[in-house]
């Protein structure tokens, strides 16, 4: 009797489908990248959003069931595409900011080099307020370092 009941329940679940729920956590990390996972973030700092995903119930034909699965996969694919687009925009922003910082460093290093080459005598102030006058050798070393920095920051972009 119990065996018949268990088999009957098993078959009824198989025929009508079981709505299964799964927890999916989404969060954005400190780099602005969105993540999807079956477990919440471990760092505890990220704000996790819990989504409940239910498997489509079979209401008759396997064609309808397959269509529902296909729609669910397409929706997930769209979300992944949106996430990738957002990340590409973010990468472009970072690249632009890096280019601007490199151009600024190039300009400043060229200005420093020009000042070192055109100033006849150089000095710096010590902590006690006294001037330290650079010798010709020290000045040559400063020019050498500034030249290296200008070359490093003013490289043409690689295509």
Image (cartoon, rainbow, N blue to C red):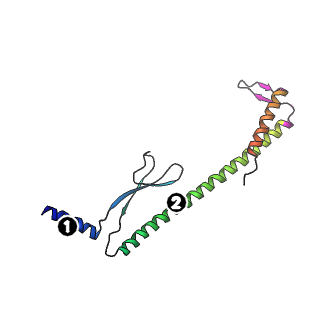
Front-most of 135 and 61? 61
The quadrant in which residue 149 appears is: top right
Q: Are marks 2 and 1 in contact (CB under 8 Å)?
A: no
Residue assigned mark 2: 83
x and y, in percent, of residue 134 in the image? 81, 27
The quadrant in which residue 121 appears is: top right
| Residue plotted at (52% across, 63% down) | 81
Q: Is residue 84 inside the magenta stretch?
A: no
The quadrant in which residue 113 appears is: top right
x and y, in percent, of residue 140 in the image? 83, 31
Mark nearer the N terminus (2 vs 1)? 1
| Residue plotted at (16% across, 62% down) | 3
Helix, strand or loop at mark 1: helix
Residue 79 lies left or right of residue 139; in this view the side is: left
Number of residue marks? 2
Residue assigned mark 1: 8
Helix, strand or loop at mark 2: helix
x and y, in percent, of residue 128 in the image? 71, 23
Label 2 Cα crowd, 10 Å radius (few <14 / some 14-19 / many 20+):
some
Q: Is residue 129 inside the magenta stretch?
A: yes
**For the residues marked 2 and 1, what is the alpha-carbon distance in whole angstroms?**
45 Å
Disc 2 versus disc 1: nearer the observer: 1
Magenta region, residue range: 117-135
């Amino acid at each position: 009797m119990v065996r018949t009941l268990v088999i009957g329940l098993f078959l009824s679940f198989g025929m009508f489908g079981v709505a299964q729920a799964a927890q999916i956590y989404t969060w954005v990390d400190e780099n602005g990248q969105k993540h999807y996972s079956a477990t919440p973030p471990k760092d505890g700092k990220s704000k996790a959003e819990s989504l409940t995903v239910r498997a489509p119930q079979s209401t008759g034909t396997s064609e309808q069931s397959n269509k529902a699965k296909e729609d669910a996969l397409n929706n997930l694919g769209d979300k992944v595409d949106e996430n990738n687009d957002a990340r590409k925009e973010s990468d472009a922003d970072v690249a632009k900011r890096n280019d601007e910082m490199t151009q600024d460093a190039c300009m400043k290093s060229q200005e420093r080099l020009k000042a070192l080459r055109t100033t006849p005598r150089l000095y710096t102030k010590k902590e006690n307020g006294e001037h330290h006058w650079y010798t010709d050798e020290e000045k040559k070393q400063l020019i050498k370092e500034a030249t290296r920095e200008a070359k490093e920051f003013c490289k043409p972009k690689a295509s």
